[in-house]
Amino acid sequence: MGLFLAQAVFYCLIPPVKVSRLVKQIHFIGWQSLVVILLTGSFTGMVLGLQGFYTLNRFGSEAFLGPMVALSLIKEMGPVITGLMVTGRAGSAVTAEIGIMRISDQIDALTLMGLNPFRYLIVPNLLAALIALPLLTAVFDVVGIMGGYIVGVKLLGVGSGTYFGEMANYVDLSEVAEGLYKSLSFGVIIAWVCCYKGFYTGIHTGFGAEGVSRATTQAVVFSSVLILVWDYFMTSIMF
Amino acid sequence: MHREANRAGAGADGSAIMIRIEDLHRSFDGVPVLKGVSLALEKGELLALIGRSGYGKSVLLKHIAGLLRPDSGRVLIDGEDMAVLRGSRLTKLRERLGFLFQGGALFDSMTVFENVAFPLREKTRMSNEAIRERVMEELSRVGLSGAEEKYPSQISGGMQKRAALARELISEPEIMLFDEPTTGLDPIFGHAILKLIDDLHRRLGFTGILVTHEIHKVFEIVDRVAFLHEGRVQAQGPPDEILASEDALVRQFVRGEIEGPVSVE
Ligand SMILES: Nc1ncnc2c1ncn2[C@@H]1O[C@H](COP(=O)(O)OP(=O)(O)OP(=O)(O)O)[C@@H](O)[C@H]1O
Ligand SMILES: [Mg+2]
């Protein structure tokens, strides 16, 4: 599996990149995940606003609701939930697509035409995930903060100036960078695991439609677990 | 015209041999499928490969194309072993080879037109108009004019097969491996496709292996027949010889009889 990633990175660095495939995958992984991210982002922010408010209220420090919501989102919730959502929505489809290409000999046909399947199938997904994940995470964070604002400020009466003011005091660029690094690494994990499982459909999972469905399930489970485990290690390193 | 040399030990001189398979063994999960296949094809020869379903014909073709690696033995294409070649020399060798997969293997994210145009778009510097002309010509040859904007999932299995054939033939390969080109086609199209293969074989002189269950029609266009059974080439020779064979197994197979050395259980 490590070799697979190394090869994928190798072909990323060596042009030509198949631009039309890349654009298509950015559209698929990024653009088409947007609605899911808007929905999950806003509700995550709202629930953080609600929970945060009642927790902070006990200590009489609702003023810190803004930074609490923002920091939770930017450092943890944003990258992690975005990663999990993209795994479920796009990663599974990537595995299924590549897996079907494998069992119906399309990957072999590509190889025999003298074309490199990594260049055509894996690299566009890897680059698209690297581009899409940080952007989706940013969208998640922004709508989440707005969700927290709606609950905290509009419903529960924290001052609007306090919400954003304290946020600006406590959130600095290094925290945003931490979220960015996380989302980038989750992009790699998703593309890596999902492409790998699709590419080797049949070898570990058996052929046929059943093989593809098993590969897809494995990809989603493995990618999700890896995201959470890796998140823990990244967090512990960056503190 | 190649037949004499073939029968006499498959071209021991070696000069004109295009495909040489030497004692090929391969098992899957401990189950042997190929148990010492040896076969040689001269340049320009067309061979029919027959054998019972599930006995490794497709597996053999994939070894010839270098898509599977043998456990032991080797496959030489024009004197070169695909299993050891790397990089640009491997790519070059692959480009000389066309493979019609049993299921067609059309790219399902592309239309029929894009599929057939794909090898030209990726591997040549032909202009778009020139490509368009070639693709339409090739599609009309396989009887698919009018279906070019459809996706593989929107056309029948037989049409997929013909589109895949057009995609392989468009780059005029020197070596063609056909895995059941006529299975799933109606008799008229089946016949037309065999005629197309025959014409192209005469015109381009490719070396080819044609896996088939349609013994009688295919025997009319091939130079030689090889019968794969229980992991080995059990019999080979010119079509008329195979048809007239005294061997009980071969007789049973080419006549499709239920009674014989092979039981249907
Ligand atoms: N990649 C693979 N992994 C495991 N087993 C395989 C693989 N490919 C083929 N086999 C097995 O090898 C045997 C031969 O299969 P193959 O597809 O070559 O048969 P065939 O002679 O082409 O049959 P048919 O005429 O039905 O196409 C089968 O038992 C199949 O299960
Ligand atoms: Mg077969």
Image (spheres, rainbow, N blue to C red):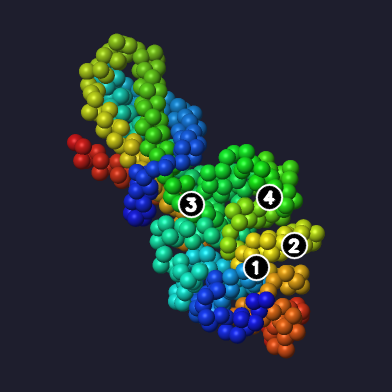
Q: Nearer the viewer, mark 4 or mark 1?
A: 4
Seen from the viewer's position, the closer of residues A89 and B176 is B176
Q: Residue at x 46, y 69 (%)?
A: B80
Within 10 angstroms of label 4, few (less than 14), some, or many (20 or more) residues? many
Q: Tag 4: residue type?
A: Glu
Q: Nearer the viewer, mark 2 or mark 3?
A: 2
**Quadrant assignment for the C terminus of chain B:** bottom right
Read off the chain for label 3.
A
What's the CA distance linking mark 4 and mark 1? 20 Å
**Which residue in the structure is indicated by mark 4?**
B138
**Which residue in the structure is indicated by mark 1?**
B210
**Which residue in the structure is indicated by mark 3?**
A115
User: Mark 2 and mark 4 in contact (Cβ < 8 Å)?
Assistant: no
Q: Is residue A89 above or below residue A50?
A: below
Q: Nearer the viewer, mark 3 or mark 4?
A: 4
User: Mark 1 and mark 3 in contact (Cβ < 8 Å)?
Assistant: no
